[in-house]
Structures are given as C-alpha cells and as structure tokens.
Image (spheres, rainbow, N blue to C red):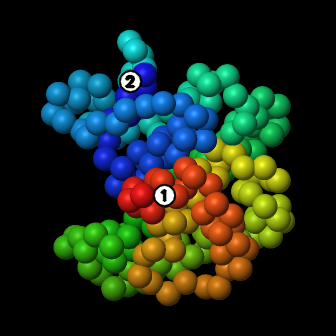
Amino acid sequence: MLTIIGKPTSINVRKVLWTCVELGLPFTREDWREEHAALNPNRMVPVLVDGDFTLWESNAICRYLCARAGSDALLPRDARARARVEQWMDWQATELNNAWRYPFMALVRASPAHTDPAQIEAGSAGWNRHVGILEAQLAATGAYVAGERFTLADVVIGLSLNRWSMTPMARPDYPHVAAYLARLVERPGYRAWCANGVP
C-alpha cells in the first residue's frame, strides 16, 4: 500500500492524489508530522512511502507512479511524446508556479509579507500572461496540454489553472482554458482532489 504524506490543501500533494486516482492505485494519506522530517531533508510535502522506498518532489512522484503501475496512460513510452508531456510538467514547476507566488500569497493567503500593490499587479499580470501561453497551446491542440489525450501534464497544469481561476483577481477571457477546465471537471480525480483538496 502506498502512503502519501501531506495535507490535500497542498497543490503538490493533490498532484499525487489525482495521479493515483487516474492510475487506479490504492493509497492511504497522512498529515505531515514532526517524525516525518527524516523522510525529506527539505521538510516539505508530498512524500511518498512505498514499502522501503521513499520519494519526494511531486513531479518525480507522479512519474514514479506511472512506472510503478506499468502504464503509459498518463506518460507515453514514445520518446517524443513523453518529452512533450515532461516539457509542460517542468514548465508548470519552474515558470507557471513562479508567476503566481506573489499574487497568490497576497490575495488568497493574505500574507503580511505580500502587500505591495505594485508587486501584486505585476505578479497578476505575469500570471495571466503565462495562462495566455496555455490558451494558445490549447487552441492548437483542441483538447489537452500535450495533445489529443489526457496526460500527467494535465494533472499538474489543471491544478495550477484551478488555482488561477479561484484567485480573486482580474483575468482575461480565455475561452480555450475555460473549455479545458470544463473537460477536466468530468474526471473523477479532478472532482475529488482539484478544488483545493475539498471533495
């Protein structure tokens, strides 16, 4: 049995939970406790425990789960198709996530360290610009981020777009993103874990 450590309010924990649902992998989930600190030197979630094997970093965990399930349903075996999925996964982790950090902390978390109006405005504009990249990509594919089929790229990016759509700020009209989110809502894993971890 897989054990996933971390609260489902974490966007990165939800990546792993949703991936398990897509792959049909049973799991148990535990909140982070002080005794878990030895499992991840960064003291961050999620952490996956699979017997005597421990893994951290959410995208690495999602890739591992696909390999463990022996399935290419979410992560293709073909080198080019796989690279396209992983390209968007890495873009989500390095570019898209960095774009929303300041406005999310200000507008959702009400962090006292994130109250500069200029930085909120600049951060919101940058976040919208990055979602505009997805709007163009979805217009090109007509379906999902990496192409015609649902993949791990949609798990990680779907969660980020859910966060974008729930943040109280001005957003451009992105019809392809809206249609994409409507497609994701049809998936049981999205309904169970995407809306801030609240089924």
Q: Which mark is residue 86?
A: none
Out of 197 and 107, give the one closest to the viewer. 197
**Taking 154 as reference, is 63 above or below it?**
above
The Cα atoms of the two marked residues, 2 and 1, are separated by 22 Å
Residue depicted at 47% across the width and 66% down the height: 163
Element on which disc 2 rests: strand
Camera sees residue 113: yes
Tell me the kind of residue under disc 2: Val
Tell me the kind of residue under disc 1: Cys
First of labels 2, 1 by sequence position: 2
**Taking 144 as reference, is 35 above or below it?**
above
Judged left or right of residue 138, residue 91 is: left
* Label 1 neighbour load within 10 Å: few <14, some 14-19, many 20+: many
Residue 19 x/y as whole percent? 55, 41
Name which quarter of the figure residue 118 lies in.
bottom left
Labelled pair 2, 1 in contact (Cβ < 8 Å):
no
- The quarter of the rendered structure image containing the N terminus is top left
Residue 134 x/y as whole percent? 68, 66
Element on which disc 1 rests: loop
Residue 189 x/y as whole percent? 55, 50
Name which quarter of the figure residue 143 lies in.
bottom right
- The quarter of the rendered structure image containing the C terminus is bottom left
Name which quarter of the figure residue 24 lies in.
top right
Residue depicted at 76% across the width and 64% down the height: 137
Q: Which residue is mark 1?
A: 194
Camera sees residue 95: no
Q: Which residue is mark 2?
A: 49
Query: Which residue extends farthest top?
Result: 52
